[in-house]
Image: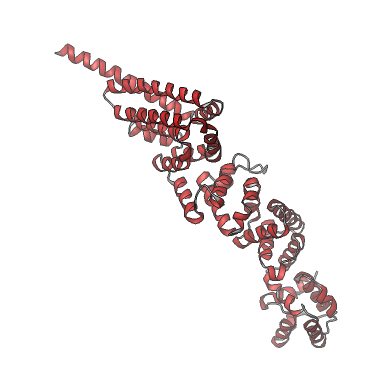
């Protein structure tokens, strides 16, 4: 009896060593998952359906042997048997697909590029930390997970997206699944229109961000975070996103870089898109001009390019007052206002005040009578932007030797009324320190 127990113990030890070898092999496979998946997809693209089926059959046979070994060890045979059954079913499914292999690859290209897939799976598994967690709860979980992934990619291409969502939910981090679900709720079917464009944009953004020297991951995070950010852009832009989806997808990294770098508000993002649509320009051209002028003028006057570009985006959204003005003019207005220390909206009153000849003539006469300002009502009327009109008023005010610091409350009220400037901007516009 003692001898039998020793033999049994030796056999158990041998089986345990075999299981350990299997675990180690799966660990190596997990660490090299990117390379494995790359080879799978590349080989699949180069094979005809018959060859693909033969390869899957070979995989099935190998797993049959592995399942048999697992049965002998008395552990987790059920997992292997289920996995083999799934793969056997997948072979039959692939045979039914037949000549639809080319369609399969189009769907693969659309939803499961290597980069996009690794973004989702790498974030869920983290390749090392979560892999150890999985091993701690049972080595077969890893084998089963890899098998499920292979089945999702190779065998059921028409359910690829659902497979990604399911795997994201069972493989660890739920952020990818949640991001996709949020997109579906907001924009509808994930394979159509805005939803599809958001997914494609997020998936295309990889490596270096639009030749900026910055990584996509550093600026936009992982795939789930990119999906969330792009979805926010789409929501801010509104119906125009679907109309311009082709442009957004074609220039996904450039658009993302400009929107992020320019610091555009929700209104600014919508306005820039509207401007591109109205002028028949590519959105990247509109944002490129905005970035160019903002950076140049901001640097020249020691201002923040992001703050200037944010002003311009908001002005673009004000179609009533700035609808026909070019980005260069809008940038100049922003820089002018910021140099005086006022917000652009503080200058808007001069637009209504001098936008018709009757009002311009009346206000010019009142300012001349009360403060000695020499103003040309016709020139004020011709000036198209608030910065130009405000500067005319300032020059005439200082030329008359006036000082707002010495004015009475009544005089300040009259000056505000006849210039149209906001009370908060009045002191800064006519401050002696801003005279130069």
Residue with the most extreme left position: 1
* Residue sitting nearer the eye, 236 or 52: 52
- Vertical placement of residue 65 versus 104, above or below: above
Residue 64 in the image: x percent, y percent?
A: 35, 22
The C terminus is located in which quarter?
bottom right
Question: Is 315 placed left or right of 42 in the picture?
Answer: right
Question: What sort of colour scheme is used for the picture?
Answer: secondary structure
Residue at position x 51%, y 33% in the image:
100
Residue 92 lies, with reference to residue 336, above or below; the image says above
Residue 362 falls in image quadrant? bottom right
Q: Left or right: 245 with respect to 294?
A: left
401 to the left or right of 160: right
- Residues 279 and 23: in front is 279
Q: Position of residue 206 (x, y in %)?
A: 59, 40
At x 41%, y 29%, the residue is 92
Q: Residue at x 36, y 27 (%)?
A: 84
Q: Where 72 sits versus 294, above or below?
A: above
Q: Is residue 40 visible?
A: yes
Foreground residue, 211 or 239? 239
Report if residue 342 is visible in the image: no
Residue 330 image offset from top left, x and y in percent: 74, 63
Of the 4 image quadrants, the one containing the N terminus is: top left
Residue 283 on image: x %, y %:
68, 53
Q: Residue at x 48, y 52 (%)?
A: 184
């Amino acid at each position: 009896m003692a001898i039998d127990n020793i033999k049994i113990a030796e056999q158990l030890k041998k089986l345990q060593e075999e299981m350990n070898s299997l675990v180690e092999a799966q660990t190596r496979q997990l660490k090299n998952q990117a390379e494995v998946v790359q080879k799978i997809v590349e080989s699949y693209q180069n094979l005809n359906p018959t060859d693909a089926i033969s390869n899957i059959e070979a995989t099935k046979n190998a797993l049959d042997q592995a399942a048999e070994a697992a049965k002998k060890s008395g552990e987790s045979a059920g997992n292997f048997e289920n996995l083999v059954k799934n793969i056997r079913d997948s072979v039959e499914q692939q045979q039914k697909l037949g000549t639809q292999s080319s369609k399969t690859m189009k769907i693969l290209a659309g939803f499961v590029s290597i980069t996009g897939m690794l973004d989702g799976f790498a974030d869920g598994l983290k390749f090392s930390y979560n892999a150890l967690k999985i091993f701690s709860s049972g080595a077969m979980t890893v084998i089963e997970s890899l098998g499920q992934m292979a089945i999702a990619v190779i065998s059921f291409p028409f359910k690829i997206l659902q497979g990604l969502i399911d795997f994201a939910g069972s493989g660890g981090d739920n952020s990818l699944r949640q991001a996709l679900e949020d997109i579906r709720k907001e924009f509808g079917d994930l394979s159509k229109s805005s939803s599809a464009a958001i997914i494609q944009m997020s998936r295309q953004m990889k490596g270096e961000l639009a030749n900026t020297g910055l990584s996509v991951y550093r600026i936009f995070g992982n795939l789930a975070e990119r999906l969330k950010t792009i979805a926010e852009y789409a929501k801010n832009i509104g119906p125009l996103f679907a109309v311009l989806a082709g442009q957004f997808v074609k220039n996904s990294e450039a658009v993302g870089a400009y929107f992020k770098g320019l610091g555009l508000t929700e209104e600014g993002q919508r306005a820039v898109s509207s401007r591109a649509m109205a002028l028949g320009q590519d959105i990247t051209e509109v944002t490129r001009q905005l970035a160019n002028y903002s950076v140049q003028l901001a640097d020249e006057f020691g201002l923040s390019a992001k703050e200037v570009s944010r002003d311009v985006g908001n002005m673009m959204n004000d179609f009533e007052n700035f609808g026909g003005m070019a980005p260069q003019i809008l940038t100049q207005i922003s820089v002018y206002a910021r140099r005086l220390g006022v917000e652009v909206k503080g200058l808007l009153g001069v637009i209504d005040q001098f936008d018709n000849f009757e009002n311009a003539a009346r206000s010019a006469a009142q300012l001349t009578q009360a403060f000695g300002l020499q103003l040309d009502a016709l020139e004020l009327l011709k000036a198209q932007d608030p910065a130009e009109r405000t500067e005319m008023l300032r020059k005439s005010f200082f030329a008359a030797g006036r000082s707002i610091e010495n004015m009475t409350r009544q005089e300040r009220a009259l000056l505000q009324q006849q210039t149209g400037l906001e009370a908060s901007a009045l002191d800064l516009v006519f401050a002696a320190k801003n005279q130069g």
